[in-house]
Image (cartoon, helix red, strand yellow):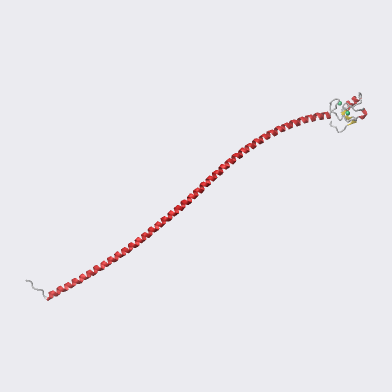
Amino acid sequence: MESPMNTEEQQSLNDEDEVIMEMLQEIELAVNEKSINVAQKEEERKSEEAMKSAETKAEQENILKQITELIGERDSLSAILKLQTEEFEQKVTKLDKMRQELLENLKSQEEQHMQQVEQIKLKFQSDLEAKDQLFLELEQRLERQQEHYELDVSCSICLDRWNSTSEHRPVSLRCGHLFGDHCIRSYLQRAYECPQCRGPAQLADLRQIFGRPA
Ligand SMILES: [Zn+2]
Ligand SMILES: [Zn+2]
C-alpha cells in the first residue's frame, strides 16, 4: 500500500512544477523572439530583394536605353555613310565625264594640229615652188640684163667690148650712139651717118666718153 504524499513532498512537487513552468515560459519567449527575428529577417530579405529587383530593373532599363542610343547612332552613321557614298559616286561620275571630255578635246586638238601641219607643209611646198619659179625668172632676167649690158658695153660695129685705154675706147656721135673709136673712124671714112640711127655724122662729132666700164 502506498502511503499518501506528505506536505513536504507535495511542496517539492509544486516547486518543480513552477520551475518547469518558468522554463516553459522562457522557452516560449525564446521561441517568440526567434519568430520575430525570423520575421524581421524575412522582411529584410524581402526588402533587399525588392531593392535588388529595382536595381536590376533600372539596370535593364539603362541597358535598353544604351541599346536604343546605339541603334540610333548606327542608323545616323549609316545615313551619313549612304550620303557620302552617293557623293563619292557623283564625284567619280563627274571626274569620269571630265576625263572623257579632256580626251576628246585632246583628240580634236591633235587632229587640228595634224591638219595645220599638213597645211603648213603644203604651203611650204607651194612657197618653195613659187620661190623656184621666181629664182628661174630672176635668172632669166639676169641673163637678159647681161645681154643688154653686153650690148651697152659693146660696139655695135664689131660686137666687141670697148676698152678705155686702147684704140677701141668708147666714143659718141652727135646722136648719142656709142662705138669703139677705131671702128667708127673707119666707118665714117666710107659714110657720113650713124650706123645705128642713120643720123648725120662726121669725124668732127666724135667725143670721147670717160667713166664707162672697161
Ligand atoms: Zn668696134
Ligand atoms: Zn646714131
Q: Position of residue 18 (x, y in %)?
A: 18, 73
| Displayed quadrant of residue 184 | top right
The picture places residue 101, in percent across and down from the top left corner, at 57, 42
Relative to the observer, which residue lies in front, 201 or 199?
Answer: 199
161 displayed left or right of 116 = right
Q: Is residue 169 among what the camera can see?
A: no
Q: Quadrant of the C terminus?
A: top right
Along the line of sight, which residue is nearer the eye, 8 or 212?
8
Depicted 130 relative to depicted 186: above or below: below
Judge whether residue 115 can be spotted in this image: yes
Q: Where in the figure is residue 195, as x and y percent of width and height? A: 88, 26
Residue at far right of view: 204
Where is ligand 2, by quadrant?
top right
Query: In the rendered view, does 15 fall on the left or right side of 68?
Result: left
In this view, 106 is above or below 10: above
Which residue is at a point 66% across and 36% down the rendered structure image? 119
Residue at 15% over, 73% down? 14
Q: Against 205, is 102 above or below? A: below
In-front residue for pair 67/1: 67
Residue drawn 28% across and 66% down?
39
Which residue is the extreme one toward the bottom? 7
Question: Which residue is rendered at x = 42% and y = 55% of the image?
Answer: 68
Q: Percent position (x, y) of residue 70?
A: 43, 54
Q: Nearer the viewer, residue 91 or 124?
A: 91
Image quadrant in which the N terminus is located:
bottom left
In screen coordinates, is 98 left or right of 15?
right
